Protein backbone atom coordinates (compact mmCIF):
# COMPACT_ATOMS: atom_id res chain seq x y z
CA UNK A 1 0.00 0.00 0.00
CA UNK A 2 1.09 3.62 -0.30
CA UNK A 3 1.88 3.71 3.44
CA UNK A 4 4.68 1.17 3.06
CA UNK A 5 2.80 -2.10 3.35
CA UNK A 6 -0.60 -3.56 4.24
CA UNK A 7 -2.93 -1.51 6.41
CA UNK A 8 -5.34 -2.81 9.03
CA UNK A 9 -9.01 -3.31 8.27
CA UNK A 10 -9.70 -0.51 10.73
CA UNK A 11 -7.54 1.94 8.77
CA UNK A 12 -9.14 0.84 5.52
CA UNK A 13 -12.66 1.21 6.94
CA UNK A 14 -11.88 4.66 8.36
CA UNK A 15 -10.51 5.88 5.03
CA UNK A 16 -13.42 4.47 3.05
CA UNK A 17 -16.03 6.17 5.23
CA UNK A 18 -14.57 9.51 6.31
CA UNK A 19 -11.64 10.45 4.09
CA UNK A 20 -12.01 14.03 2.81
CA UNK A 21 -10.96 12.62 -0.56
CA UNK A 22 -14.13 10.74 -1.45
CA UNK A 23 -15.15 9.17 1.87
CA UNK A 24 -18.58 7.52 1.72
CA UNK A 25 -20.23 9.77 4.30
CA UNK A 26 -18.51 12.98 3.33
CA UNK A 27 -20.35 14.05 0.18
CA UNK A 28 -23.67 12.31 -0.31
CA UNK A 29 -27.06 11.50 1.21
CA UNK A 30 -26.72 7.80 2.02
CA UNK A 31 -30.00 7.38 3.90
CA UNK A 32 -33.51 6.44 2.84
CA UNK A 33 -34.89 4.50 -0.09
CA UNK A 34 -32.96 6.64 -2.57
CA UNK A 35 -29.71 6.14 -0.65
CA UNK A 36 -27.88 3.02 0.44
CA UNK A 37 -29.77 1.93 3.56
CA UNK A 38 -32.67 2.89 5.82
CA UNK A 39 -32.53 3.70 9.54
CA UNK A 40 -35.27 3.61 12.17
CA UNK A 41 -35.90 7.39 12.30
CA UNK A 42 -36.51 7.38 8.54
CA UNK A 43 -39.14 4.64 8.91
CA UNK A 44 -41.39 6.36 11.44
CA UNK A 45 -41.55 9.66 13.31
CA UNK A 46 -42.54 7.64 16.37
CA UNK A 47 -39.01 6.34 16.82
CA UNK A 48 -37.63 9.81 17.53
CA UNK A 49 -40.68 10.60 19.66
CA UNK A 50 -40.05 7.55 21.86
CA UNK A 51 -36.40 8.52 22.29
CA UNK A 52 -37.66 11.97 23.28
CA UNK A 53 -39.90 10.43 25.94
CA UNK A 54 -36.91 8.50 27.26
CA UNK A 55 -34.91 11.75 27.47
CA UNK A 56 -37.68 13.59 29.33
CA UNK A 57 -38.10 10.70 31.78
CA UNK A 58 -34.36 10.48 32.39
CA UNK A 59 -34.15 14.26 32.89
CA UNK A 60 -36.84 13.89 35.56
CA UNK A 61 -34.88 11.08 37.22
CA UNK A 62 -31.88 13.41 37.29
CA UNK A 63 -33.91 15.92 39.30
CA UNK A 64 -34.99 18.16 36.39
CA UNK A 65 -31.73 20.14 36.16
CA UNK A 66 -32.21 23.65 34.71
CA UNK A 67 -29.41 23.06 32.19
CA UNK A 68 -29.05 19.87 30.15
CA UNK A 69 -26.78 19.16 27.22
CA UNK A 70 -28.38 16.83 24.67
CA UNK A 71 -25.59 15.35 22.57
CA UNK A 72 -26.11 13.17 19.50
CA UNK A 73 -23.24 11.24 17.98
CA UNK A 74 -23.56 10.79 14.22
CA UNK A 75 -26.98 12.44 13.69
CA UNK A 76 -27.38 11.36 10.06
CA UNK A 77 -29.92 13.58 8.33
CA UNK A 78 -31.02 15.01 11.67
CA UNK A 79 -34.36 13.19 11.49
CA UNK A 80 -34.18 11.62 14.95
CA UNK A 81 -33.27 14.88 16.66
CA UNK A 82 -35.93 16.80 14.72
CA UNK A 83 -38.65 14.35 15.81
CA UNK A 84 -37.31 14.42 19.37
CA UNK A 85 -37.37 18.23 19.62
CA UNK A 86 -40.77 18.49 17.97
CA UNK A 87 -42.25 15.74 20.13
CA UNK A 88 -40.95 17.17 23.42
CA UNK A 89 -41.71 20.83 22.69
CA UNK A 90 -44.80 20.58 24.92
CA UNK A 91 -42.60 19.81 27.94
CA UNK A 92 -41.70 23.45 28.45
CA UNK A 93 -39.28 23.11 31.36
CA UNK A 94 -37.43 20.31 29.60
CA UNK A 95 -37.23 22.28 26.35
CA UNK A 96 -35.98 25.39 28.12
CA UNK A 97 -33.21 23.38 29.79
CA UNK A 98 -31.77 22.08 26.51
CA UNK A 99 -28.71 22.92 24.53
CA UNK A 100 -28.19 20.54 21.60
CA UNK A 101 -24.76 19.42 20.47
CA UNK A 102 -24.30 17.39 17.27
CA UNK A 103 -21.07 15.48 16.68
CA UNK A 104 -20.75 15.31 12.91
CA UNK A 105 -17.76 15.56 10.59
CA UNK A 106 -19.54 15.22 7.23
CA UNK A 107 -20.16 18.56 5.49
CA UNK A 108 -23.05 17.12 3.50
CA UNK A 109 -24.80 15.74 6.57
CA UNK A 110 -24.26 18.92 8.58
CA UNK A 111 -26.16 20.80 5.90
CA UNK A 112 -29.08 18.35 6.11
CA UNK A 113 -29.11 18.56 9.90
CA UNK A 114 -29.23 22.37 9.79
CA UNK A 115 -32.29 22.20 7.59
CA UNK A 116 -33.98 19.32 9.48
CA UNK A 117 -33.77 21.20 12.78
CA UNK A 118 -35.11 24.36 11.11
CA UNK A 119 -32.08 26.26 12.28
CA UNK A 120 -31.59 29.98 11.95
CA UNK A 121 -28.49 31.97 12.73
CA UNK A 122 -27.67 32.32 16.40
CA UNK A 123 -27.67 35.88 17.73
CA UNK A 124 -24.16 37.28 17.57
CA UNK A 125 -22.37 40.53 18.06
CA UNK A 126 -21.33 40.86 14.43
CA UNK A 127 -23.12 40.82 11.12
CA UNK A 128 -22.36 37.84 8.88
CA UNK A 129 -19.82 38.43 6.14
CA UNK A 130 -20.76 38.00 2.51
CA UNK A 131 -19.09 34.57 2.56
CA UNK A 132 -21.02 33.52 5.69
CA UNK A 133 -24.29 34.76 4.23
CA UNK A 134 -23.65 32.78 1.05
CA UNK A 135 -22.93 29.66 3.06
CA UNK A 136 -26.13 30.11 5.07
CA UNK A 137 -28.08 30.40 1.85
CA UNK A 138 -26.77 27.05 0.68
CA UNK A 139 -27.42 25.47 4.08
CA UNK A 140 -31.06 26.51 3.91
CA UNK A 141 -31.22 24.89 0.49
CA UNK A 142 -29.87 21.67 1.99
CA UNK A 143 -26.55 21.92 0.13
CA UNK A 144 -23.05 21.95 1.63
CA UNK A 145 -21.46 25.37 1.05
CA UNK A 146 -18.64 23.76 -0.93
CA UNK A 147 -21.13 22.81 -3.63
CA UNK A 148 -22.18 26.42 -3.77
CA UNK A 149 -18.55 27.45 -4.13
CA UNK A 150 -18.16 25.05 -7.04
CA UNK A 151 -21.27 26.46 -8.64
CA UNK A 152 -19.91 30.02 -8.33
CA UNK A 153 -16.75 28.94 -10.13
CA UNK A 154 -18.84 27.67 -13.01
CA UNK A 155 -18.69 23.96 -12.21
CA UNK A 156 -21.90 22.65 -13.66
CA UNK A 157 -22.69 26.18 -14.86
CA UNK A 158 -24.78 26.69 -11.72
CA UNK A 159 -27.41 24.22 -12.85
CA UNK A 160 -29.13 21.66 -10.66
CA UNK A 161 -27.40 18.92 -12.64
CA UNK A 162 -24.03 20.48 -11.89
CA UNK A 163 -24.75 20.70 -8.18
CA UNK A 164 -26.02 17.13 -8.03
CA UNK A 165 -22.93 15.92 -9.82
CA UNK A 166 -20.92 16.96 -6.79
CA UNK A 167 -22.68 14.39 -4.65
CA UNK A 168 -22.31 11.34 -6.88
CA UNK A 169 -19.97 8.40 -6.57
CA UNK A 170 -16.39 9.31 -7.24
CA UNK A 171 -17.10 13.03 -6.93
CA UNK A 172 -18.03 14.67 -3.71
CA UNK A 173 -16.66 17.37 -1.54
CA UNK A 174 -13.17 16.08 -1.06
CA UNK A 175 -12.71 15.49 -4.77
CA UNK A 176 -13.48 19.06 -5.83
CA UNK A 177 -10.21 20.35 -7.17
CA UNK A 178 -9.19 23.74 -5.85
CA UNK A 179 -12.20 24.07 -3.55
CA UNK A 180 -12.02 26.28 -0.50
CA UNK A 181 -12.09 24.54 2.89
CA UNK A 182 -15.65 23.75 3.89
CA UNK A 183 -17.07 25.92 6.63
CA UNK A 184 -20.49 26.62 8.09
CA UNK A 185 -21.88 28.33 11.16
CA UNK A 186 -21.04 26.22 14.16
CA UNK A 187 -24.11 27.39 16.04
CA UNK A 188 -27.76 27.91 15.23
CA UNK A 189 -31.16 28.11 16.90
CA UNK A 190 -33.73 25.37 16.33
CA UNK A 191 -37.13 26.46 15.10
CA UNK A 192 -38.82 23.65 17.08
CA UNK A 193 -38.22 24.98 20.57
CA UNK A 194 -35.69 27.81 20.36
CA UNK A 195 -32.81 25.83 21.86
CA UNK A 196 -29.26 26.42 20.75
CA UNK A 197 -27.67 23.89 18.39
CA UNK A 198 -23.92 23.53 18.07
CA UNK A 199 -21.86 21.30 15.77
CA UNK A 200 -18.64 19.53 16.71
CA UNK A 201 -16.25 17.29 14.83
CA UNK A 202 -15.38 15.13 17.86
CA UNK A 203 -16.92 14.15 21.18
CA UNK A 204 -13.98 15.68 23.02
CA UNK A 205 -14.87 19.13 21.66
CA UNK A 206 -18.32 18.98 23.31
CA UNK A 207 -18.28 20.63 26.76
CA UNK A 208 -18.42 17.90 29.40
CA UNK A 209 -19.83 20.12 32.16
CA UNK A 210 -20.90 21.74 34.30
CA UNK A 211 -24.07 19.78 34.86
CA UNK A 212 -25.34 16.55 33.31
CA UNK A 213 -25.61 15.48 29.70
CA UNK A 214 -27.72 12.99 27.81
CA UNK A 215 -25.94 11.31 24.89
CA UNK A 216 -27.70 9.61 21.98
CA UNK A 217 -25.86 7.19 19.70
CA UNK A 218 -28.19 5.66 17.12
CA UNK A 219 -26.37 3.55 14.51
CA UNK A 220 -23.16 5.32 15.46
CA UNK A 221 -21.02 2.53 16.85
CA UNK A 222 -21.63 0.25 13.83
CA UNK A 223 -19.81 2.71 11.57
CA UNK A 224 -16.67 2.85 13.72
CA UNK A 225 -13.69 0.92 12.32
CA UNK A 226 -13.03 -2.63 13.48
CA UNK A 227 -9.95 -4.82 13.73
CA UNK A 228 -10.18 -8.53 13.00
CA UNK A 229 -7.80 -11.10 14.46
CA UNK A 230 -7.24 -14.80 13.79
CA UNK A 231 -5.44 -17.14 16.18
CA UNK A 232 -2.63 -19.06 14.44
CA UNK A 233 -1.18 -22.19 16.08
CA UNK A 234 2.41 -20.97 15.83
CA UNK A 235 2.24 -17.25 15.06
CA UNK A 236 -0.25 -16.32 17.79
CA UNK A 237 -2.91 -13.69 17.18
CA UNK A 238 -2.52 -12.45 13.62
CA UNK A 239 -4.42 -9.49 12.19
CA UNK A 240 -6.30 -9.23 8.90
CA UNK A 241 -4.74 -6.55 6.74
CA UNK A 242 -5.63 -4.96 3.40
CA UNK A 243 -2.89 -5.23 0.81
CA UNK A 244 -2.39 -4.79 -2.91
CA UNK A 245 -2.78 -7.91 -5.00
CA UNK A 246 0.55 -9.32 -6.18
CA UNK A 247 0.48 -9.15 -9.96
CA UNK A 248 2.34 -12.44 -10.34
CA UNK A 249 -0.16 -14.23 -8.09
CA UNK A 250 -3.26 -13.34 -10.07
CA UNK A 251 -6.65 -12.37 -8.70
CA UNK A 252 -6.92 -15.23 -6.22
CA UNK A 253 -4.14 -14.08 -3.92
CA UNK A 254 -1.95 -17.16 -3.77
CA UNK A 255 -2.56 -19.02 -0.54
CA UNK A 256 -0.05 -18.85 2.29
CA UNK A 257 2.55 -16.78 0.49
CA UNK A 258 6.28 -17.23 0.76
CA UNK A 259 7.31 -13.63 1.24
CA UNK A 260 10.34 -11.77 -0.02
CA UNK A 261 12.69 -8.98 0.89
CA UNK A 262 10.14 -6.54 -0.51
CA UNK A 263 7.28 -7.85 1.65
CA UNK A 264 5.11 -5.79 3.95
CA UNK A 265 6.25 -4.24 7.19
CA UNK A 266 5.32 -5.83 10.47
CA UNK A 267 4.31 -3.97 13.60
CA UNK A 268 7.93 -3.48 14.70
CA UNK A 269 9.10 -2.08 11.40
CA UNK A 270 10.81 -5.22 10.10
CA UNK A 271 10.32 -6.77 6.70
CA UNK A 272 8.58 -10.12 6.93
CA UNK A 273 6.64 -12.63 4.88
CA UNK A 274 2.96 -12.01 4.28
CA UNK A 275 0.26 -14.63 4.73
CA UNK A 276 -2.61 -14.32 2.28
CA UNK A 277 -6.16 -15.09 3.35
CA UNK A 278 -7.43 -17.27 0.55
CA UNK A 279 -8.66 -20.65 -0.62
CA UNK A 280 -5.20 -22.14 -0.18
CA UNK A 281 -5.05 -21.48 3.56
CA UNK A 282 -3.73 -24.13 5.91
CA UNK A 283 -6.22 -26.41 7.71
CA UNK A 284 -5.58 -24.53 10.95
CA UNK A 285 -6.57 -21.21 9.42
CA UNK A 286 -9.53 -22.79 7.70
CA UNK A 287 -10.69 -24.12 11.06
CA UNK A 288 -10.43 -20.66 12.57
CA UNK A 289 -12.42 -19.23 9.71
CA UNK A 290 -15.09 -21.88 10.11
CA UNK A 291 -15.50 -20.95 13.76
CA UNK A 292 -15.33 -17.26 13.04
CA UNK A 293 -17.48 -17.02 9.94
CA UNK A 294 -16.22 -14.74 7.23
CA UNK A 295 -19.07 -12.88 5.61
CA UNK A 296 -17.42 -9.51 5.32
CA UNK A 297 -17.14 -9.30 1.64
CA UNK A 298 -19.63 -11.42 -0.24
CA UNK A 299 -23.12 -10.53 -1.27
CA UNK A 300 -24.74 -11.14 2.09
CA UNK A 301 -27.51 -8.72 2.77
CA UNK A 302 -30.73 -7.59 1.25
CA UNK A 303 -32.33 -8.64 -1.97
CA UNK A 304 -32.53 -5.13 -3.22
CA UNK A 305 -35.62 -4.06 -1.29
CA UNK A 306 -35.70 -0.28 -1.35
CA UNK A 307 -36.29 -0.30 2.37
CA UNK A 308 -33.45 -2.61 3.32
CA UNK A 309 -31.47 -2.34 6.53
CA UNK A 310 -28.12 -3.89 7.38
CA UNK A 311 -27.62 -7.66 6.77
CA UNK A 312 -26.95 -10.13 9.55
CA UNK A 313 -23.37 -11.10 10.43
CA UNK A 314 -22.17 -14.58 9.68
CA UNK A 315 -21.39 -15.89 13.16
CA UNK A 316 -20.08 -15.10 16.59
CA UNK A 317 -16.51 -15.89 17.48
CA UNK A 318 -17.65 -19.06 19.17
CA UNK A 319 -20.16 -20.01 16.49
CA UNK A 320 -23.01 -19.63 18.98
CA UNK A 321 -25.38 -16.98 20.18
CA UNK A 322 -23.16 -16.20 23.12
CA UNK A 323 -25.18 -18.14 25.63
CA UNK A 324 -23.79 -21.59 25.01
CA UNK A 325 -26.64 -22.63 22.77
CA UNK A 326 -26.39 -24.10 19.30
CA UNK A 327 -24.98 -22.10 16.38
CA UNK A 328 -27.15 -19.52 14.71
CA UNK A 329 -29.43 -20.74 11.92
CA UNK A 330 -28.58 -20.02 8.31
CA UNK A 331 -31.54 -17.71 7.97
CA UNK A 332 -30.38 -15.63 10.93
CA UNK A 333 -26.70 -15.65 10.07
CA UNK A 334 -26.90 -14.33 6.53
CA UNK A 335 -25.58 -15.75 3.31
CA UNK A 336 -21.97 -14.64 3.30
CA UNK A 337 -20.38 -17.37 5.41
CA UNK A 338 -17.47 -18.11 3.12
CA UNK A 339 -16.14 -18.74 -0.34
CA UNK A 340 -18.55 -21.17 -1.91
CA UNK A 341 -19.43 -22.41 1.59
CA UNK A 342 -15.88 -23.59 2.21
CA UNK A 343 -15.67 -21.87 5.57
CA UNK A 344 -12.92 -19.46 4.52
CA UNK A 345 -13.30 -15.69 4.20
CA UNK A 346 -15.16 -14.64 1.07
CA UNK A 347 -13.51 -11.23 0.88
CA UNK A 348 -10.07 -12.38 -0.23
CA UNK A 349 -9.69 -10.33 -3.40
CA UNK A 350 -11.61 -7.71 -5.32
CA UNK A 351 -11.82 -5.98 -8.65
CA UNK A 352 -10.19 -2.96 -7.00
CA UNK A 353 -6.76 -4.65 -6.94
CA UNK A 354 -6.93 -5.26 -3.19
CA UNK A 355 -6.84 -8.41 -1.11
CA UNK A 356 -6.81 -9.44 2.54
CA UNK A 357 -3.70 -10.91 4.10
CA UNK A 358 -2.82 -12.00 7.61
CA UNK A 359 0.03 -10.35 9.48
CA UNK A 360 3.01 -12.66 9.97
CA UNK A 361 2.69 -12.32 13.73
CA UNK A 362 0.93 -10.29 16.43
CA UNK A 363 0.56 -6.62 15.56
CA UNK A 364 0.59 -3.90 18.25
CA UNK A 365 -3.21 -3.77 17.91
CA UNK A 366 -3.49 -7.52 18.49
CA UNK A 367 -1.19 -7.38 21.52
CA UNK A 368 -3.25 -4.60 23.10
CA UNK A 369 -6.85 -5.28 22.06
CA UNK A 370 -7.25 -9.06 22.14
CA UNK A 371 -6.28 -9.52 25.82
CA UNK A 372 -8.49 -6.60 26.82
CA UNK A 373 -11.56 -7.96 25.05
CA UNK A 374 -11.04 -11.56 26.18
CA UNK A 375 -10.65 -10.37 29.79
CA UNK A 376 -14.41 -9.95 29.84
CA UNK A 377 -14.99 -13.66 29.14
CA UNK A 378 -14.71 -16.79 31.22
CA UNK A 379 -11.34 -18.53 30.84
CA UNK A 380 -12.77 -21.53 28.97
CA UNK A 381 -14.73 -19.30 26.60
CA UNK A 382 -11.73 -17.11 25.86
CA UNK A 383 -9.50 -20.11 25.15
CA UNK A 384 -12.04 -21.52 22.69
CA UNK A 385 -12.12 -18.41 20.54
CA UNK A 386 -10.14 -18.71 17.31
CA UNK A 387 -11.10 -15.41 15.66
CA UNK A 388 -12.37 -12.15 17.07
CA UNK A 389 -13.51 -8.75 15.83
CA UNK A 390 -12.81 -5.75 18.07
CA UNK A 391 -13.88 -2.14 17.65
CA UNK A 392 -11.18 -0.20 19.47
CA UNK A 393 -12.79 3.14 18.57
CA UNK A 394 -16.12 1.93 19.97
CA UNK A 395 -14.60 0.82 23.25
CA UNK A 396 -12.68 4.10 23.53
CA UNK A 397 -15.87 6.08 22.90
CA UNK A 398 -17.77 4.11 25.55
CA UNK A 399 -14.92 4.74 27.96
CA UNK A 400 -14.96 8.48 27.25
CA UNK A 401 -18.74 8.60 27.75
CA UNK A 402 -18.31 6.77 31.03
CA UNK A 403 -15.68 9.24 32.21
CA UNK A 404 -17.88 12.21 31.32
CA UNK A 405 -20.90 10.73 33.06
CA UNK A 406 -18.85 9.87 36.16
CA UNK A 407 -17.59 13.45 36.40
CA UNK A 408 -20.75 15.40 35.57
CA UNK A 409 -23.73 13.00 35.62
CA UNK A 410 -26.20 11.90 33.00
CA UNK A 411 -26.62 8.93 30.70
CA UNK A 412 -25.92 7.69 27.18
CA UNK A 413 -28.46 5.78 25.10
CA UNK A 414 -26.92 3.40 22.54
CA UNK A 415 -29.18 1.95 19.82
CA UNK A 416 -27.69 -0.27 17.16
CA UNK A 417 -27.80 -3.71 15.59
CA UNK A 418 -25.75 -6.23 17.49
CA UNK A 419 -25.98 -8.17 20.74
CA UNK A 420 -24.43 -8.94 24.09
CA UNK A 421 -22.58 -12.15 24.83
CA UNK A 422 -19.64 -13.54 22.87
CA UNK A 423 -17.80 -11.20 20.50
CA UNK A 424 -18.19 -11.52 16.75
CA UNK A 425 -15.41 -12.97 14.63
CA UNK A 426 -16.36 -11.31 11.35
CA UNK A 427 -19.51 -9.19 11.06
CA UNK A 428 -18.19 -6.54 8.69
CA UNK A 429 -20.51 -5.90 5.75
CA UNK A 430 -20.64 -3.50 2.80
CA UNK A 431 -23.87 -2.11 1.37
CA UNK A 432 -24.35 -0.15 -1.81
CA UNK A 433 -27.82 0.82 -3.06
CA UNK A 434 -29.47 -1.61 -0.63
CA UNK A 435 -27.38 -4.58 -1.79
CA UNK A 436 -24.52 -6.38 -0.12
CA UNK A 437 -21.19 -6.05 -1.96
CA UNK A 438 -17.60 -7.01 -1.23
CA UNK A 439 -15.85 -4.89 1.38
CA UNK A 440 -12.90 -4.37 -0.99
CA UNK A 441 -15.12 -3.54 -3.95
CA UNK A 442 -14.98 0.15 -4.88
CA UNK A 443 -13.49 1.71 -1.74
CA UNK A 444 -15.50 4.76 -0.69
CA UNK A 445 -18.58 3.85 -2.73
CA UNK A 446 -20.31 1.56 -0.19
CA UNK A 447 -21.27 1.77 3.46
CA UNK A 448 -19.03 -0.37 5.67
CA UNK A 449 -20.40 -1.35 9.04
CA UNK A 450 -19.98 -4.03 11.69
CA UNK A 451 -22.46 -5.42 14.19
CA UNK A 452 -22.00 -3.90 17.62
CA UNK A 453 -20.48 -5.97 20.41
CA UNK A 454 -22.48 -4.58 23.33
CA UNK A 455 -20.53 -6.54 25.92
CA UNK A 456 -17.36 -4.83 24.72
CA UNK A 457 -19.04 -1.45 25.29
CA UNK A 458 -20.11 -2.57 28.77
CA UNK A 459 -16.57 -3.74 29.52
CA UNK A 460 -15.17 -0.36 28.45
CA UNK A 461 -17.77 1.62 30.41
CA UNK A 462 -17.74 -0.36 33.64
CA UNK A 463 -14.25 -1.85 33.64
CA UNK A 464 -13.30 -5.53 33.98
CA UNK A 465 -15.66 -7.65 36.08
CA UNK A 466 -14.57 -8.86 39.48
CA UNK A 467 -14.86 -8.24 43.24
CA UNK A 468 -15.21 -4.56 44.05
CA UNK A 469 -15.59 -3.66 40.39
CA UNK A 470 -18.78 -1.63 40.87
CA UNK A 471 -17.99 1.99 40.05
CA UNK A 472 -19.82 5.29 39.58
CA UNK A 473 -21.03 4.31 36.09
CA UNK A 474 -23.06 1.26 35.12
CA UNK A 475 -24.55 -0.14 31.92
CA UNK A 476 -28.16 -1.34 31.64
CA UNK A 477 -29.28 -3.66 28.87
CA UNK A 478 -29.03 -4.44 26.10
CA UNK A 479 -32.69 -5.12 25.48
CA UNK A 480 -34.34 -5.57 22.12
CA UNK A 481 -35.55 -2.50 20.27
CA UNK A 482 -39.03 -4.03 20.30
CA UNK A 483 -39.09 -4.28 24.11
CA UNK A 484 -37.66 -0.79 24.51
CA UNK A 485 -40.15 0.93 22.19
CA UNK A 486 -43.14 -0.97 23.58
CA UNK A 487 -42.16 -0.05 27.15
CA UNK A 488 -42.09 3.61 26.14
CA UNK A 489 -45.58 3.37 24.64
CA UNK A 490 -45.08 3.29 20.88
CA UNK A 491 -48.21 1.20 20.35
CA UNK A 492 -50.34 3.69 22.28
CA UNK A 493 -48.84 6.50 20.23
CA UNK A 494 -49.66 4.56 17.06
CA UNK A 495 -53.30 4.26 18.10
CA UNK A 496 -53.54 8.01 18.63
CA UNK A 497 -51.90 8.88 15.32
CA UNK A 498 -53.87 6.28 13.36
CA UNK A 499 -57.13 7.62 14.80
CA UNK A 500 -56.20 11.11 13.60
CA UNK A 501 -54.95 9.96 10.18
CA UNK A 502 -56.38 11.77 7.18
CA UNK A 503 -56.93 8.56 5.21
CA UNK A 504 -56.87 4.77 5.59
CA UNK A 505 -53.68 4.74 3.54
CA UNK A 506 -51.95 7.07 5.99
CA UNK A 507 -53.10 4.95 8.94
CA UNK A 508 -51.83 1.81 7.22
CA UNK A 509 -48.47 3.46 6.56
CA UNK A 510 -48.14 4.34 10.24
CA UNK A 511 -48.97 0.77 11.23
CA UNK A 512 -46.47 -0.68 8.76
CA UNK A 513 -43.73 1.58 10.09
CA UNK A 514 -44.25 0.50 13.70
CA UNK A 515 -44.53 -3.15 12.64
CA UNK A 516 -41.11 -2.89 11.07
CA UNK A 517 -39.58 -1.20 14.11
CA UNK A 518 -40.85 -3.78 16.61
CA UNK A 519 -41.31 -6.86 14.43
CA UNK A 520 -38.98 -9.82 14.83
CA UNK A 521 -39.36 -11.45 11.42
CA UNK A 522 -37.30 -11.18 8.27
CA UNK A 523 -36.58 -7.56 7.37
CA UNK A 524 -37.77 -6.21 10.73
CA UNK A 525 -35.68 -4.48 13.37
CA UNK A 526 -37.31 -5.46 16.64
CA UNK A 527 -34.88 -8.23 17.59
CA UNK A 528 -31.64 -7.50 15.71
CA UNK A 529 -31.49 -3.92 16.97
CA UNK A 530 -30.57 -3.59 20.64
CA UNK A 531 -30.69 -0.76 23.17
CA UNK A 532 -28.28 -0.17 26.03
CA UNK A 533 -27.70 2.73 28.43
CA UNK A 534 -24.46 3.85 30.07
CA UNK A 535 -25.41 5.89 33.12
CA UNK A 536 -24.50 7.10 36.57
CA UNK A 537 -25.00 4.31 39.06
CA UNK A 538 -27.79 6.18 40.85
CA UNK A 539 -30.03 5.67 37.81
CA UNK A 540 -29.82 1.86 37.96
CA UNK A 541 -33.32 0.41 37.72
CA UNK A 542 -34.85 3.84 37.05
CA UNK A 543 -34.43 4.20 33.28
CA UNK A 544 -37.51 3.74 31.13
CA UNK A 545 -37.48 0.64 28.94
CA UNK A 546 -34.23 -0.77 30.39
Image: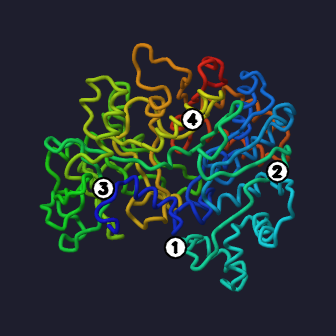
- Which-is-in-front pick, marks 1 and 4? 4
* Sequence-first disc among 4 and 2: 2
* Sequence-first disc among 2 and 1: 1
Which residue is at the front of the view, 309 or 424? Answer: 424
* Sequence-first disc among 1 and 3: 1
Give the image location of residue 184, x and y in percent: 72, 62
Which numbered disc covers residue 170?
A: 1
In the rendered image, the residue lying farthest to the top is 467
Residue receiving disc 2: 189
Q: Secondary structure at mark 3?
A: strand
Q: Quadrant of the N terminus?
A: bottom left
Work out how far the residue at label 3 is from the one at label 2, CA to CA, in angstroms: 45 Å
Q: Secondary structure at mark 1?
A: loop
* Sequence-first disc among 1 and 4: 1
Question: Image point 15% across, 60% down: which residue?
Answer: 257
| Disc 2 to disc 1: CB gap under 8 Å | no
| Disc 1 to disc 3: CB gap under 8 Å | no
Give the image location of residue 487, x and y in percent: 66, 25
| Disc 4 to disc 3: CB gap under 8 Å | no
* Sequence-first disc among 4 and 3: 3
Q: Secondary structure at mark 2?
A: strand
Work out how far the residue at label 1 is from the one at label 4, CA to CA, in angstroms: 35 Å
Q: Is residue 17 above or below residue 475?
A: below
Give the image location of residue 211, x and y in percent: 71, 30
Report crowding for label 2: few under 14, some 14 to 19, many 20 or more residues within 10 A (C-alpha).
many
* Sequence-first disc among 3 and 2: 2
Q: Secondary structure at mark 4?
A: helix
Which numbered disc covers residue 241?
A: 3
Question: Image point 86% across, 45% down: which residue?
Answer: 194
Amino acid sequence: MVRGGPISLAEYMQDCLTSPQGGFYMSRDVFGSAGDFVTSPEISQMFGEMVGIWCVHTWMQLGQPPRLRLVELGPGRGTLMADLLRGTAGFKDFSRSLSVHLVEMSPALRAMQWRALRCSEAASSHSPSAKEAEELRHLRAGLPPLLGQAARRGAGAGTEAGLEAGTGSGGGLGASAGAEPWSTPEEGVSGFNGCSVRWHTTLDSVPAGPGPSLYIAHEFFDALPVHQFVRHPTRGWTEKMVDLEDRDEGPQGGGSGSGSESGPRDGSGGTTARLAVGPGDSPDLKSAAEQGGGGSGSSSGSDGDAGSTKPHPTAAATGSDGSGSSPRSASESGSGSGAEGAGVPAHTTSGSGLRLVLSPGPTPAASMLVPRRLAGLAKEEAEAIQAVEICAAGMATAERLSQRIAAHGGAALVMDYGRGGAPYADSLVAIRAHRGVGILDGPGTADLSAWVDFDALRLAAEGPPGPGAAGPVRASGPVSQAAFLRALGIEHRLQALAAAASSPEQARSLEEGVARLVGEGEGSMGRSYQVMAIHESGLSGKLAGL
